[in-house]
């Protein structure tokens, strides 16, 4: 690799943290070196296959549990051509059903959050309770055939884990816990439920949803589009772990990339990490290369007094980016004090477009009032800034998508640093074509 | 032009990188014997090895200027190791920073007391031999705005005043004291290298303010330091030389 310095990153010893997030390096899967066909990013036929064999088969992230604390609170969220209502029940459980009226098909609610005593279609006032049962059909006597079968909306599997609500369009889907495994053991120690919303944004991006998943699955692009991050993180000493269908990488933060010379002054972004941790960078006497460890030790020592319970996290987790992909479409940058996650949804009809949801949560220190939830904002690609780093990520994607459509571009030519992309597409292949079923002519 | 540096004994504080290392290289090439220090042991070791290739005597030991006793001991050691001292260039700096009172004590200890303690250490030898040359390193940021109100800028400014007064006071001893104020200088691992990578817009704005469209190199500062430090500059005393490619706006009348 093109580096200026050889850097040994210290990592915690797996034996020292038997009950926390697993840290041992998984053996890399042997996934070959073939190209990932570009056609799967542009083909409408492939998009239909994804719908039939992935989106309607897997568990999908619906929202945050704490957005629907009370009976009747609901999350209305779209996936492809479907819209789903997730409703908190009187017994505290959650149920999901299609967001539509069985009369003429009208949507019951616009996408978003709310509370409803019942769901009444505004067209003819058909009314549904929290369980999706029809409780009123005006002029029922004018329907000689009676009401629709069962007088209820079909139910979608729906469950909660880790402070999040999940649903599936597949009535026969495996249990959520089985689907998410082993992610629960990895993310549990972070206690996402102790973190509050700080950002809720949806951007309509001009690329296929997989181009976005790919973009957040490797650190090889840091030197190209995020040059400033080389004075913030180590994009070279990255541990990649692929699991059955999910994957992760561990990126040292508060570190200097081996691709640049070690500075003698503390870089601005690392300065900010220190200040956020409660340190005074002016007091720091060590070298810049030792700051990561100094921040870990400081947070370990002072976290509890700051109302921040880091007791289940290992030392690396106090600084580093543990980045997970939950198949198919959730990417999470998980940190001790915050989570920045993306939900990457396909467009309903156009393989060249997607919905990019940015959800950011921050740890609320004990004794601090729970902050007000920010309003959801939605806009078009490039219309507004979503922050320097994500703008940099977003900037390339439309031109990546254009290149995908060229006859001259056959597919992605991937490096070992991009193993997670290869793994993601392998999992996708197994859903689309059946395990190991992808043929030589399949895209 | 012969600078007359052959065989001179020079002490450089902060010579592991950047302007300090470049200055050490110029002096070593001109035939000076050198005693150098910096905070990082590896940095000093590498610099000593690098400078040794010019054939002169080069000694070095790591030292934290903030630790006054260690620093004074290092200075005494350096003078002894060189068997005297003709040239002193204390260049080490705590750098910039805002938002903590500690930046003031850091800048005072390193940027001000670093040179003060070094000058105190070499004066007896220089006075005894009736010759010596001292270069203090300030900054164009002392005279013009840069990076907000910082201890660094203000503390560096004090060296310009103190340098002139040292020159007036010790001229009779044959000791010359001059001040060099470099403008923005870029080198790998330096602040401007990092600023280029992390704050590209600010960096580009700086370039636009540079008449030559670029920042300086350590060598361009080092050659000016070496000249002022050398016997060739025998009539320069109490001078303040701004070396900035024309970056600063002020006209020097």
Image (cartoon, grey):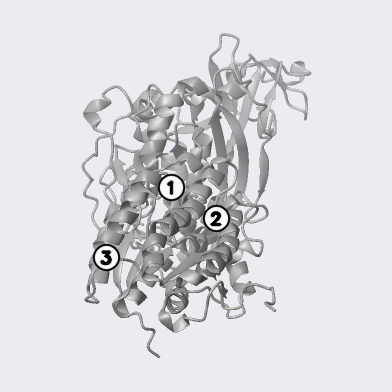
Point out which mark residue A394 bears. 2
- Give the quarter of the figure containing the N terminus of chain B: bottom left
Give the CA distance from mark 3 to mark 2.
59 Å
Give the crowd class for mark 2: few <14, some 14-19, many >=20 residues within 10 Å.
Answer: many
Residue under pointer 3: B82
Please tell me which residue is depicted at 46% across the width and 59% down the height of the picture: A227
Label 2's element?
Answer: helix
Looking at the image, residue B27 sits to the left or right of residue A281; the answer is left
Q: Are marks 3 and 1 on the same chain?
A: no
Residue A77, image quadrant: top right
Residue A175 in view, yes or no: no
Q: Chain of mark 3?
A: B
Q: Are marks 3 and 2 on the same chain?
A: no
Residue A120: x, y in percent?
73, 22
Point out which mark residue A49 bears. 1
Give the CA distance from mark 2 to mark 1.
26 Å
């Amino acid at each position: 690799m093109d580096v200026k310095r050889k850097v040994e990153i210290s990592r915690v010893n797996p034996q020292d943290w038997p009950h926390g997030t697993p840290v041992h390096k998984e053996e890399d899967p042997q996934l070959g070196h073939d190209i990932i066909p570009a056609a799967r990013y542009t083909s409408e036929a492939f998009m239909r296959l994804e719908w039939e064999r992935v989106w309607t088969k897997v568990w999908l992230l619906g929202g945050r549990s704490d957005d629907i604390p009370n009976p009747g609170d609901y999350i209305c969220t779209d996936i492809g051509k479907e819209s789903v209502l997730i409703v908190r029940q009187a017994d505290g459980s959650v149920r999901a059903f299609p967001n539509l009226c069985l009369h003429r098909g009208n949507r019951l609610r616009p996408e978003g959050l709310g509370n409803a005593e019942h769901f009444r279609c505004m067209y003819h006032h058909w009314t549904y309770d929290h369980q999706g049962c029809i409780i009123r059909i005006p002029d029922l006597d004018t329907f000689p055939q009676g009401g629709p079968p069962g007088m209820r909306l079909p139910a979608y599997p729906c469950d909660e884990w880790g402070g999040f609500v999940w649903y599936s369009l597949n009535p026969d889907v495996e249990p959520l816990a089985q689907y998410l495994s082993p992610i629960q053991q990895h993310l549990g120690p972070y206690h996402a439920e102790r973190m509050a919303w700080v950002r809720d944004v949806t951007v309509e991006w001009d690329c296929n949803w997989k181009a976005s998943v790919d973009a957040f699955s490797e650190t090889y692009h840091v030197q190209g589009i995020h040059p400033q991050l080389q004075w913030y993180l180590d994009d070279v000493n990255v541990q990649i772990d692929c699991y059955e269908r999910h994957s992760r990488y561990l990126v040292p933060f508060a570190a200097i990339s081996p691709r640049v010379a070690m500075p003698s002054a503390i870089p601005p972004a690392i300065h900010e990490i220190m200040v956020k941790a409660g340190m005074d960078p002016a007091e720091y006497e060590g070298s810049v290369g030792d700051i990561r460890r100094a921040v870990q030790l400081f947070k370990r020592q002072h976290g509890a007094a700051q109302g921040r319970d880091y007791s289940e996290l290992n030392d690396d987790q106090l600084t580093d980016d543990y980045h997970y992909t939950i198949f198919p479409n959730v990417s999470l940058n998980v940190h001790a004090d915050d989570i920045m996650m993306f939900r990457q949804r396909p467009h309903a009809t156009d393989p060249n477009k997607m919905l990019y949801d940015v959800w950011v949560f921050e740890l609320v220190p004990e004794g601090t009032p729970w902050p007000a939830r920010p309003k959801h904002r939605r806009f078009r690609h490039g219309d507004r800034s979503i922050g320097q780093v994500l703008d940099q990520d977003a900037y390339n994607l439309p031109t990546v998508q254009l290149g995908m459509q060229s006859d001259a571009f056959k597919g992605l030519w991937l490096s070992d640093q991009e193993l997670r992309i290869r793994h993601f597409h392998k999992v996708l292949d197994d859903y689309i074509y059946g395990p190991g079923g992808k043929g030589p002519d399949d895209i | 032009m012969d600078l007359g540096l052959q065989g001179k004994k020079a002490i450089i504080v902060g010579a592991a990188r950047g302007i300090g290392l470049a200055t050490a290289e110029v002096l070593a090439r001109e035939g000076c014997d050198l005693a150098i220090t910096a905070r990082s042991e590896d940095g000093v070791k590498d610099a000593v090895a690098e400078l040794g290739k010019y054939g002169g005597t080069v000694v070095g030991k790591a030292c934290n200027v903030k630790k006054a006793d260690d620093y004074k001991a290092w200075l005494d050691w350096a003078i002894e190791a060189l068997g005297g001292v003709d040239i002193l260039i204390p260049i080490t700096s705590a750098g910039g920073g805002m938002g903590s009172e500690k930046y003031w004590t850091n800048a005072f200890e390193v940027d001000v007391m670093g040179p003060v303690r070094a000058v105190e250490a070499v004066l007896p030898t220089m006075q005894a031999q009736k010759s010596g040359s001292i270069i203090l390193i300030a900054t164009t940021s002392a005279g013009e705005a840069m990076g907000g109100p910082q201890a660094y800028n203000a503390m560096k400014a004090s060296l310009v005043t103190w340098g002139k007064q040292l020159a007036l006071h010790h001229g009779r001893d044959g000791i010359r004291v001059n001040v060099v104020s470099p403008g923005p200088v870029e080198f790998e691992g330096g602040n401007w290298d990092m600023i280029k990578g992390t704050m590209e817009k600010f960096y580009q704005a700086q370039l636009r303010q540079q008449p030559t469209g670029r920042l300086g190199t350590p060598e361009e500062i080092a050659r000016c330091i070496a000249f002022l430090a050398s016997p060739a500059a025998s009539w320069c005393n109490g001078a303040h030389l701004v070396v900035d490619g024309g970056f600063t706006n002020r006209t020097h009348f």
